Image: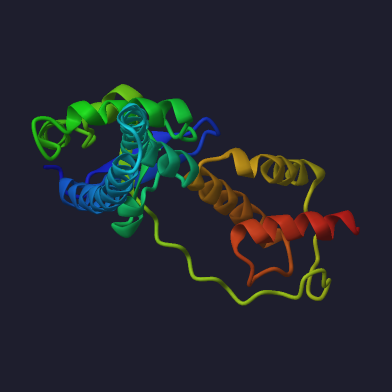
Amino acid sequence: MHLDDRLTIETPEGVSIELTLAGLGSRLGAAAVDITIQTVVLLALVLALTLAGAVVSADLGIFVMGIGTLLIALVVLGYYLLFEALNGGRTPGKAAFGIRVATVDGRPLTLAAVTLRTLLRLVDFLPLLYAVGAMSVVATSKNQRLGDLVANTVVVRDRKPTPAAPPEVAGSRQGWDVATVSDAEMAIVRRYSARRHQLTPEARVKLAAETAARLRPKVTGGQYLDDEDFLLQLLVEKSRD
């Protein structure tokens, strides 16, 4: 197993990001939490279907069991599709262990990638309790199970959030002097503002940090704002000049 492995990726925005790969222990712990949640849901579903089948005719009972089989498949596969696609690569188990799915090349995680790694989960689970997947994590340089290899994804540790700084009074010009910031530099800030929601979390944080570090020496004010808020407020202040 690779302990505390790190992966450096170059994002499409030209920003180098260093990620810490999740190890086998945290991944198995997250899987155990997710399987427990799914088991509880499935038991409740089977109980409801059993009760429903007991009160209907035989023909209708077969129909109910068919619907139940479909619902079970949706729970097993849809669980990962729902959480990983809509929650930044984090299932409840991954969130509990502070890890998430990310792409190897730093691009945003797509539904197609999540679908591929979810379908391959059926193979990784063989012959029991993710034995194939665990061996793959140990054997590969980027700690990838088969689903990760096919989907071009990795599982990484979440970065700890930076403590919030004391806020400044919104809209206040007190202490702000932006006269020395050039139009070319403001164009960079505007591009960042327009595209920030399209960036991966790591690229967004790093690009904001690099841009803010370049401009803070030219600006009086905003010292208590984090990097992104500083850049957004700088847009407001510059528009007033």
Query: What x and y, as percent, mark residue 35?
Result: 24, 47
Q: Is residue 100 above or below residue 138?
A: below
The single residue placed furthest to the front in the displayed view is 57
Left or right of 210? Residue 20 is left
Which residue is at 29% across, 43% downward? 54
Residue 167 spot, x, y in % from top left: 66, 74
Quick one: quadrant of the C terminus? bottom right
Whether residue 220 is visible, yes or no, is: yes
Which residue is painted at 44% across and 40% down in the image? 82
Could you tell whether 180 is left or right of 21 in the image? Answer: right
Q: Position of residue 17 (x, y in %)?
A: 42, 42
Vertically, is 60 above or below 231? Answer: above
> Nearest the camera: 185 or 180?
185
The colour style of the image is: rainbow
> Relative to the observer, which residue lies in front, 239 or 103?
103
| Position of residue 145 in the picture relative to residue 73 (left or right) | left
Which residue sits at x=25%, y=54%? 33
Residue 148 located left or right of residue 78: left
Q: Quadrant of the N terminus?
A: top left
| Front-lying residue, 154 or 120 | 120
How many numbered discs, if any?
A: 0
| Quadrant position of residue 174 | bottom right
Residue 149, quarter of picture: top left
Seen from this angle, which residue lies furthest top? Answer: 150
Q: Is residue 180 visible?
A: no
Return the x and y of residue 92 as percentages of the image width and height.
35, 53
